[in-house]
Image (spheres, coloured by chain):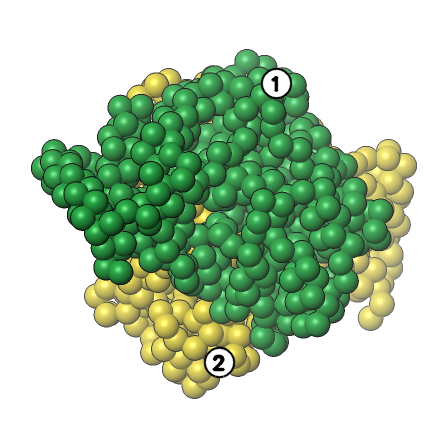
Chain colours: A green, B yellow
Amino acid sequence: MNYSQLSKEELQQIYDLQKNEYDNLVSQGYSVDIARGKPCNEQLDIAMPMLNIEGIENMPKSYRNYGMLDGIPELKKIFAQMLGVNTNEVILGGSSSLNLMYDTIQRALQFGIMGGEPWNKSAVKFLCPVPGYDRHFAICEHFGIEMVNVPMDEHGPNMDLVEQLVANDDSIKGIWCVPKYSNPTGVTYSDEVVKRLAEMKPKAKDFRIFWDNAYVVHDLTDTPDNLANIMELCKEAGTEDRVYQFASTSKVTMAGAGVSCIATSVNNVKDILSHMTMQTISYNKVWQYIHYLFLKDMDNVREIMKKQRDIIKPKFDTLLRAFEDSFGEDSGIATWTNPNGGYFITLDVLDGCAKRVCMLCKEAGLTLTAAGAPFPYGRDINDRTLRIAPTFTSDSDLIVATQILTCCVKLACVEKLLEK
Amino acid sequence: MNYSQLSKEELQQIYDLQKNEYDNLVSQGYSVDIARGKPCNEQLDIAMPMLNIEGIENMPKSYRNYGMLDGIPELKKIFAQMLGVNTNEVILGGSSSLNLMYDTIQRALQFGIMGGEPWNKSAVKFLCPVPGYDRHFAICEHFGIEMVNVPMDEHGPNMDLVEQLVANDDSIKGIWCVPKYSNPTGVTYSDEVVKRLAEMKPKAKDFRIFWDNAYVVHDLTDTPDNLANIMELCKEAGTEDRVYQFASTSKVTMAGAGVSCIATSVNNVKDILSHMTMQTISYNKVWQYIHYLFLKDMDNVREIMKKQRDIIKPKFDTLLRAFEDSFGEDSGIATWTNPNGGYFITLDVLDGCAKRVCMLCKEAGLTLTAAGAPFPYGRDINDRTLRIAPTFTSDSDLIVATQILTCCVKLACVEKLLEK
């Protein structure tokens, strides 16, 4: 059933039906939240052995003391393997990779990169593939960095546009990328996109790719996506200083108590540490060692991620089935992504309806990520895109969430069609 | 024996004797380091129960997840009691209070304080009581903040000078203070000094006191110093937004794996969080909870600090006895502090001899904090002050250290006197 081909009367019938269901849902007084990409308690339970970890008695005593600004070698090695870089290209941080990204931009603004002019001295722009991660955009907005939208398709950002923009404007200093299971679309950048990012010729000599590899091992299926190794491609292209790669164990161990890292060229590592050594003496190396004991090696990391997947994949399936049942293939009012990994489903509704869906959901007790959030300045010019985060909610609440969500999408879209 | 009253011949005799002893020490090939204020392994052992802590099963599950930017209430309460503030005046950080200080200055530079003009927009100066903490000065130097020396005496910084400087120069935006057991002199600010700091009238409306209360519970004797509560005094004076107070458990639990905090007015807390919420989602709340379980309450913190004292007080005594034996009261070549707490002894030698002492010690295998380090830009205009950090070294190494140090002080000072 394609809604746009229905008569006014047919639409009105559907509207009345949905309105009835909606009023019923509102009357239930539900309270469900699928706004943020947070792990659920069952996922967090996986890492509970960290709190009483076997082998801790073998921790080098010096790890308890000051020093080792770049982190402990045992855990650097695991991150290096995870990200396809050398161990000396890794700096470990505290619990938040966002903090490392923020600090990296703040350093560039205040001090410049590798002795270059501080970004604060002139106007700075960042390319923002859209839809994207709201917290990346929030950092730019907070620092007054102008954001330039670049549309995403199923291969990643539109590289013709990226290449053209960076080649002609030396105020464009960076690009935000979530290259694998992108937040929120789940897209993994194609080999060609990664290669072109490595090989393109930015006018700004201090241009940097902020490669937020947040979902590097976060597969949901037996046919996971494969992301090309940007560091290798950059080394081949002679552009190895171009990429700051970020990752963390927030969605491997504990979201609020992971270990973060930045992986980048040896030159960049040296540049970063020259400032970081003024900022802190060291991050928490005991927690890093506990992580090392728990993660062990990449084989074990993959085992942990299978456990994670077993918990969250059914939640994705619940939503995907409900979308299929409610909207089918040709309703014309909704399309959605079916990602091989990551934390999100993107639901695109009829143009001009996303905000209305959010508002209707909220009144019925379901909190969604704000419409517009996946866009710079919160501006979705099509008012179309909704980011759905199924992981945190309990299975029973998720069923409620799908009921409310699908009802509200239908209601909002039929309203819109009736306006015409 | 006052060296300055000795004849050339007597001095030469002492020189020959010391040179002989020195050559003997050099020939031993020692390697000892008393440069940094680091806890020793026995101190760090005290906190080992944290790694397998009783009661962890009662941790609220949400602490493992994202959120709670300002930290967990249980540990905020302990810090609040420790620092004499309210719980809502505390923000918990990661493992490093230096990181919180650096970030606080960086925020002021980039964004200004409470909507004021960003400090980056004009020249900024900080008052630096000297001698002081080298890492404070390193932050200023790194940011290009001009440092203005203020001499310390046994009551704290010279307040006549501080009041006069801040009243007449609105580019003076801050003052570094280690108010209790000051690094490196061990001085605790007198009640009057604290009161005058709270009541003075800086020309800069966004002037801030950086109150690094690093040694708030770090007593070494049964007659500990008492530091007036600056927050209370500021509230009385109507200047409660003036102070950023910092502390950490680095020297209570583990130096490289403590929990840090900033304690400041509710207005400042709000201002800081408005930026911090862009920087990170949360610090490591699991580690915060483990700290809460281990620290329990202030009574238990005091018990822990007694254990710390039992380990390090004998090390201070070893040095103090050696200084007494070697220099007596009226040698005229060395004076030293006998602190009631903290991590350092300051040894002042004959003017113009500190660098030479460091060099001689180094050649004999003893690493000291670089002469000049306790001063902005590393400039001790008198070339007089040495910072001694006895805690990290083993008891046997400390005996070697005292032999080398006392020998080198005599040698350098006699050399200097012979030049005249």
| Quadrant including the N terminus of chain B | bottom right
Badge 1 is on which residue? Answer: A300
- Residue A242 visible in the picture: yes
- Type of amino acid at the residue the image marks with label 2: Ser
Gap in Å between the C-alphas at discs 2 and 1?
A: 56 Å
Q: Dot 1 surroundings within 10 Å: few (below 14), some, or many (20 or more)?
A: few
| Mark 2 or 1, closer to the camera | 1
Of B20 and B203, nearer the camera is: B203
Of A36 and B329, nearer the camera is: A36
- Please tell me whether mark 1 sits on a helix, a strand or a loop: helix
Residue A22 lies, in percent from the top left, at 16, 40
Judge from the rendering whether residue A24 lies leftward or rightward of residue B102; answer left or right: left
Residue B263 lies, in percent from the top left, at 35, 53
Q: Which residue is drawn at 67% across and 56% down?
A: A159
Q: Is residue B151 above or below residue B340?
A: below
- Residue B293 visible in the picture: no
Q: Which residue is drawn at 47% across and 38% down?
A: A337
Residue B342 lies, in percent from the top left, at 49, 45
Residue B224 in which image quadrant:
top left
Judge from the rendering whether residue A68 lies leftward or rightward of residue A399; answer left or right: right
Residue A49 lies, in percent from the top left, at 47, 17
Judge from the rendering whether residue B200 lies leftward or rightward of residue A159; answer left or right: left
The chain letter for the residue carrying disc 1 is A
Identify the residue at the far bottom of this view: B168
- Type of amino acid at the residue the image marks with label 1: Asn
Badge 2 is on which residue? Answer: B171
Judge from the rendering whether residue B138 lies leftward or rightward of residue B409; answer left or right: left
Identify the residue at the far top of this view: A54
Residue A346 in which image quadrant:
top left
